């Protein structure tokens, strides 16, 4: 298979398979998680739940008192690369075109130079969080193969995308194909790894806020 | 058949000035990315060069390549260089027909065995014994294998000859293949494009006449000097791509302002050719300059790479599995949910209440 055929494959059959597994896996996992339910809470709530769940969704994005100082890199780099990923995925004209082709939805993109700069910063911060995960004994102890795999699956599309647009390392056609392939791998594994947090994050935070309020600690 | 006269003698006969000839050599040196000092060397070599015999075989093709090479410039040095070779067999251009035409080919193959250049345009059908394209009752495969034996080199002109082209597009009913799929023991240069740029074939011929061998080729057998960079690399609209300014339709404000055509399906980023610099129609313009994206015609399988109007970052074919995936995902999810709930119920019913008496046992 030459480069041109490889590109056509990742743009057609490969993408079809990846999106198929992504949709299947995501629905499967979400049905499974949310249908599991909880045991009926027989205790009388100490407090009305109110909007504690909703508040927690936002509050959990802020560091608790003292934590920012203790874990500065995690917070700053964590924020930076998550926002960076959002900007790259959702506000790059070429990606918007892909989303438009798949869903019909589109919106204005940002200048490519801005996306380039964001990509460099995102890559740097992702390397930083990896370095910290390896260097901090506690984090290293808590890390499993899945954590490193999730990091790699997220890092590769960003790296190959940057190398492709900058025409570095490999011919553009091949690098673009690898970029699309790496995204397809991410889509395939996302529902079955910790990366599912892109969907479950909001529900989990809401549940924690809600139950904590009922136990007497409203937010 | 006598040896052909030299290029210098032929030029003198046609009254072409040395100045015009040197201008041509300079243009060729520039096209092939050779150093300025090579112009004199090219001129000297070309003047002394014997006009090589050329057999042009047209197989499964549309004659677009010949149309491009003969009609796009009238008359220019590109046309003249065609006078500089001895085109001994070419279906479209030759006056002879029938047995006379075939005899000309046979004579050339015999008299210039090991010296003639073989130019091929069109793909070669292999299915059903190659019956889908025959000349004088012989299959293209048969003619190619015969002519290739005595050829000094083969030039595959056009994407059909170079990569199979449109006849090779799915489902490829005739089993069309490229020249390189059949001939393995001869130097072959692919001049792809649908059609290829006239200056590229004259450049390759000039290189062959000057140096006596074919130019350096890329991994697809194309001359690096012409196919070394992508259309996108040399496109005058590239700054708009870098700025993220894209035409959204062929008649919007962006299109009128000359913005990048990426979103309208331009394949310039993955297409290697010199359209953006050499241009077409005597340097008038090229497709992107005329407001249409590049189709990627000088790349293999360009016809099967999805719509010409879907951007490179888009899916090249509609998703087929998504709807089934939604149904399957929901079904698996519900099935797992039921299984989990049954497990919970079973655990609940199996639960035994412990009494104080039990604990004291």
Image: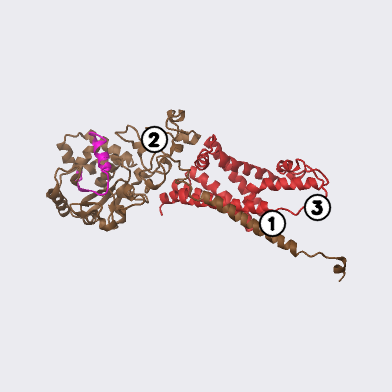
Chain colours: A red, B brown
Residue occupying image coordinates x 46% and y 49%:
A12
Marks 1 and 3 belong to one chain? yes
Give the residues drawn in magenta, as a range. B48-77
Residue B178: x, y in percent? 31, 52
Q: Which residue is mark 1?
A: A142
User: Of helix, strand and loop, which one carries label 2?
Assistant: loop
Q: Chain of mark 1?
A: A
User: Which residue appears farthest toward the bottom when viewing the image?
Assistant: B361
The residue where tag 3 is placed is: A42
How packed is label 2: few (under 14 Cα within 10 Å), some, or many (20 or more)? some
Q: Nearer the viewer, mark 1 or mark 2?
A: 2
Q: Secondary structure at mark 3?
A: loop
Image quadrant where one finds the N terminus of chain A: bottom left
Whole-number angstrom distance, CA of label 1 to CA of label 3 = 34 Å
Disc 1 vs disc 3: which is toward the camera?
3
Query: Which label number is shown at residue A45?
Result: none
Question: Which residue is at a point 83% across and 65% down the rendered structure image?
Answer: B354
Disc 3 from disc 2: Cα separation = 69 Å
Kindly identify which chain the residue marked by label 3 belongs to.
A
Measured as percent of width and height from the top left, residue B85 is found at 20, 44
Q: Residue B46 in the image: x percent, y percent?
A: 23, 43
């Amino acid at each position: 298979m030459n480069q041109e055929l490889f590109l056509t494959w990742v743009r057609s059959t490969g993408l079809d398979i990846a999106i198929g597994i992504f949709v299947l896996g995501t629905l499967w996992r979400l049905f499974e998680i949310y249908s599991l339910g909880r045991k009926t809470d027989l205790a009388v709530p100490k407090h009305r739940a109110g909007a504690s769940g909703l508040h927690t969704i936002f509050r959990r994005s802020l560091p608790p008192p003292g934590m920012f100082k203790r874990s500065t890199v995690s917070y700053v780099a964590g924020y930076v690369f998550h926002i960076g990923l959002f900007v790259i995925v959702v506000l790059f004209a070429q990606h918007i075109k892909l989303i438009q082709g798949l869903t019909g939805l589109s919106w204005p993109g940002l200048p490519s130079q801005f996306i380039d700069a964001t990509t460099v910063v995102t890559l740097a911060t992702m390397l930083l969080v990896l370095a910290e995960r390896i260097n901090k004994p506690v984090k290293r102890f808590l890390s499993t193969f899945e954590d490193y795999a999730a990091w790699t699956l997220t890092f590769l599309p960003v790296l190959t995308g940057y190398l492709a647009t900058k025409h570095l390392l490999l011919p553009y056609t091949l690098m673009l194909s690898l970029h699309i392939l790496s995204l397809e791998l991410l889509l395939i594994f996302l529902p079955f790894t910790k990366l599912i947090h892109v969907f479950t994050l909001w529900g989990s935070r809401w549940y924690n806020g809600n139950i904590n309020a009922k136990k007497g600690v409203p937010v | 058949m006598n040896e052909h006269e030299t290029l210098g003698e032929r030029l003198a006969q046609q009254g072409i000035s040395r100045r015009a000839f040197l201008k041509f050599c300079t243009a060729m040196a520039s096209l092939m990315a050779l150093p300025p000092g090579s112009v004199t060397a090219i001129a000297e070599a070309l003047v002394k060069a014997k006009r090589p015999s050329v057999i042009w075989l047209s197989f499964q093709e549309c004659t677009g390549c010949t149309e491009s090479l003969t009609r796009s410039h009238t008359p220019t040095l590109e046309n003249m260089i065609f006078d500089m070779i001895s085109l001994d067999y070419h279906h479209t251009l030759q006056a002879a027909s029938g047995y006379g035409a075939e005899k000309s080919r046979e004579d050339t193959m015999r008299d210039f065995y090991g010296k003639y250049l073989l130019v091929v345009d069109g793909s070669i059908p292999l299915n059903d014994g190659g019956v889908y394209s025959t000349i004088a009752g012989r299959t293209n495969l048969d003619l190619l294998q015969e002519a290739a034996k005595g050829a000094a080199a083969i030039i595959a002109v056009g994407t059909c000859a170079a990569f199979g082209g449109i006849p090779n597009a799915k489902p490829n009913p005739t089993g069309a293949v490229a020249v390189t799929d059949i001939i393995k023991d001869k130097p072959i240069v692919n001049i792809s494009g649908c059609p290829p740029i006239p200056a590229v074939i004259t450049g390759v011929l000039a290189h062959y006449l000057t140096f006596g061998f074919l130019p350096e080729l890329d991994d697809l057998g194309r001359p690096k000097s012409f196919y070394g960079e992508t259309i996108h690399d040399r496109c005058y609209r590239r700054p708009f791509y870098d700025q993220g300014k894209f035409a959204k339709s062929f008649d919007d404000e962006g299109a009128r302002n000359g913005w990048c055509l990426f979103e309208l399906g331009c394949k310039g980023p993955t297409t290697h050719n010199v359209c953006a610099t050499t241009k077409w129609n005597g340097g008038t313009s090229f497709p992107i300059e005329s407001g249409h994206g590049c189709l990627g015609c000088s790349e293999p399988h360009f016809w099967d790479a999805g719509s010409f109007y879907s951007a490179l970052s888009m899916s090249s074919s509609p998703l087929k599995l998504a709807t089934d995936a939604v149904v399957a995902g929901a079904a698996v999810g519900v099935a797992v949910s039921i299984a989990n709930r049954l497990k919970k119920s079973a655990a609940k019913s199996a639960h035994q209440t412990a009494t104080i008496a039990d604990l004291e046992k």
